[in-house]
Image (cartoon, rainbow, N blue to C red):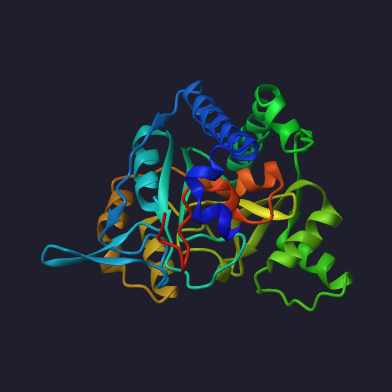
Amino acid sequence: LDTKLNWRFLYFRTKEARAIFRIQTTILKAFREFFLERGFIEMQPPCIIASASEGGAELFSLPYFEKKAYLAQSPQLYKQMGAISFEKVFMIVPVFRAEKFNQPTHLNEIRQMDVEIAFANDEDAMKLLEECFVSILRRVKNENEKELEDLNVKLKIPKLPLKRITYSEAIEILNKKGEKIEWGEDFSKTQERILGKEVGEAFFIKDWPLELKPFYAMPKDEKVCRAFDLIYRGLEISSGTQRIHLPELLEERIKAKGLDPKSFEFYITAFKYGAPEHAGWSIGLERLTMCIVQKKNIREVTMFPRDRHRLLP
């Protein structure tokens, strides 16, 4: 793999590289056209931000004249502000995560395909996501027959609606398979693969513990929020939630996560002028590509990957 990454310009001349990145081009085109055909506005949110989009310390900081700024880990706050005004928005953006671990499924810079819709709950968002996801797979199957053949990949199109299981049901399944996992813990990549084998090729896990999801996730009750993950071929490729649209509750949840509401003042203020129920999600471009072309390392489907040790080429 290192040879492929070090000599990228030579690797790009191979049949394999051409097939992977033609398929990735179809994914991007299919995503964009799916939403343009449905009257969505394409947003261009900033990549340099003043505070964390989702909380946590996994941010790259940089000097910004007399201030400190960060590289965006997500366009979250901006897409919500866009959706409550424009109603339907989408975007394809780079995001940056200062995560120190070096795993086959993680990079420090990725491309995210984000969507946000107003007058919608978590079920509406899941329905839109599964329709978009299947539409992308269908386009790849129809437009990249030769490339799939070159990579020796067979692409099945899942039937809609996709199966939905709750987080609690997923915990039960894993414990029955001998995995020692308690309610409130996140799933490892191995556990996601086990769920994939037990539940199916593509499915949703919904109704997650509040503590595992960001502050803007709408609570369903005291312990659970209206959040969902899409698992495809044993890997989480998309996450989403119904968002909190009530400023008082938003402040409460920001404090509960140990964050300072003052850092999110511009965001909270947007909801004080009236905001409808809204929901959204994002798909990781590289992860989806990796699952479609069945590669084991995300670096293989990223033109110039950036991880903890790699800044070149």
**Which image quadrant is residue 222 in?**
bottom right
Residue, far left: 66
Residue 225 lies left or right of residue 190; in this view the side is left
Count all numbered tags in the image, as a single digit. Answer: 0
Q: Residue at x 44, y 67 (%)?
A: 253
Decide if residue 205 is on the left or right side of residue 225.
Answer: right
Residue 218: give x, y in percent of width and height: 52, 57
Residue 185, image x and y in percent? 66, 74
Residue at 45% in and 23% down: 39
Seen from the viewer's position, the closer of residues 183 and 9 is: 9
Left or right of 99? Residue 185 is: right
Residue at 48% over, 38% down: 117
Q: Where residue 106 appears, x then y in whole percent? A: 56, 61
Image vertical order of residue 26 relative to residue 264, above or below: above
Seen in the picture, residue 234 relative to 119 is either above or below; the reply is below
Is 278 or 159 nearer to us in this picture? 159
Residue 311 in sight from this viewpoint: yes
As displayed, is residue 242 above or below residue 62? Answer: above
Which is more toward the observer, 40 or 248? Answer: 40
Looking at the picture, does residue 225 appear above or below residue 304?
Answer: below
Which part of the image, by quadrant, shows the C terminus? Answer: bottom left
Image coordinates for residue 173, horizontal then vertical, percent: 84, 65
- 25 with respect to 180 (left or right): left
Residue 74 visible in the picture? no
| Quadrant where the image shows the N terminus | bottom right
* Residue at image coords 36%, 73%: 259
